[in-house]
Amino acid sequence: MILAEVIRKKWGVDSFTVKNHGDSYVCSAVSMLVLNTVNSIEALTDQAFDCDYNNEGGYISFYLTGPMRSGTAILLDSMILGLTSVQDQYPTEIKLTII
C-alpha cells in the first residue's frame, strides 16, 4: 500500500512524504502526480525547498525551506486533489493522511 502523508500548516502545505509501492497503475498515477508537482514547483516558482528520494522508487520526501511563494500553494493543493481522487478510486492501494 502506498502511504502519503501531507503536513499542512496555517499557510498551506509545509511538507509531504510518499512511500511504498502498490498496484502498478496506481503507483504510476501517484508517481506522476508527485513528481510533476515537485518539477513544477522547481520550474515555475522561486520556492526554496528540499527533496529527498530513492532513485529506485518507493520514497520521496518534500519540504519547504523558505516562505511559501506565489504559485506553490496551488500546485501542492492540486497534488492533494489528485491524490484524493486516486484514493477514492483505489482505497485499498493508497492511504492519504493530511495532518
Image (cartoon, rainbow, N blue to C red):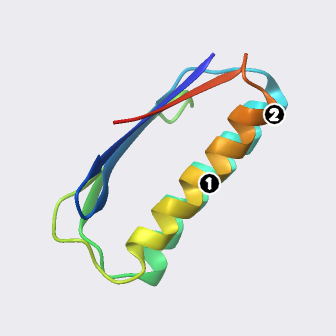
Q: Residue at x 64, y 21 (%)?
A: 21
From this view, report whether residue 62 is shown above or below residue 75: above
Q: Residue at x 24, y 69 (%)?
A: 48
Residue 34 at what x, y percent from top left? 56, 50
13 vs 67, left or right, is right
**Residue at mark 2 to residue at mark 1: CA–CA distance:** 13 Å
Residue 71 circle label = none
From this view, report whether residue 72 is shown above or below residue 78: below
Is there any visible trace of residue 61 in the rendered image?
A: no
Q: Residue at x 55, y 20 (%)?
A: 20
31 vs 3, left or right, is right
Query: What residue type is disc 1 on?
Result: Leu
Residue 81 circle label = 1
Mark with earlier residue (2, 1): 1
Residue 15 at what x, y percent from top left? 31, 47
Query: What residue type is disc 2 on?
Result: Gln
Residue 91 at what x, y percent from top left? 72, 23
From this view, report whether residue 22 is shown above or below residue 72: above
Quadrant housing the C terminus: top left
* SS for callout 1: helix
Quadrant housing the N terminus: top right
* SS for callout 2: helix
**Label 2–label 1 contact, CB within 8 A:** no
Is the residue marked by circle 1 packed among few (<14), some (14-19), or many (20+) residues within 10 Å? few
**Residue linked to disc 2:** 89
Towards the viewer: 53 or 37:
37
Towards the viewer: 54 or 72:
72
Is there any visible trace of residue 1 in the rendered image?
A: yes
From this view, report whether residue 76 is shown above or below residue 52: below
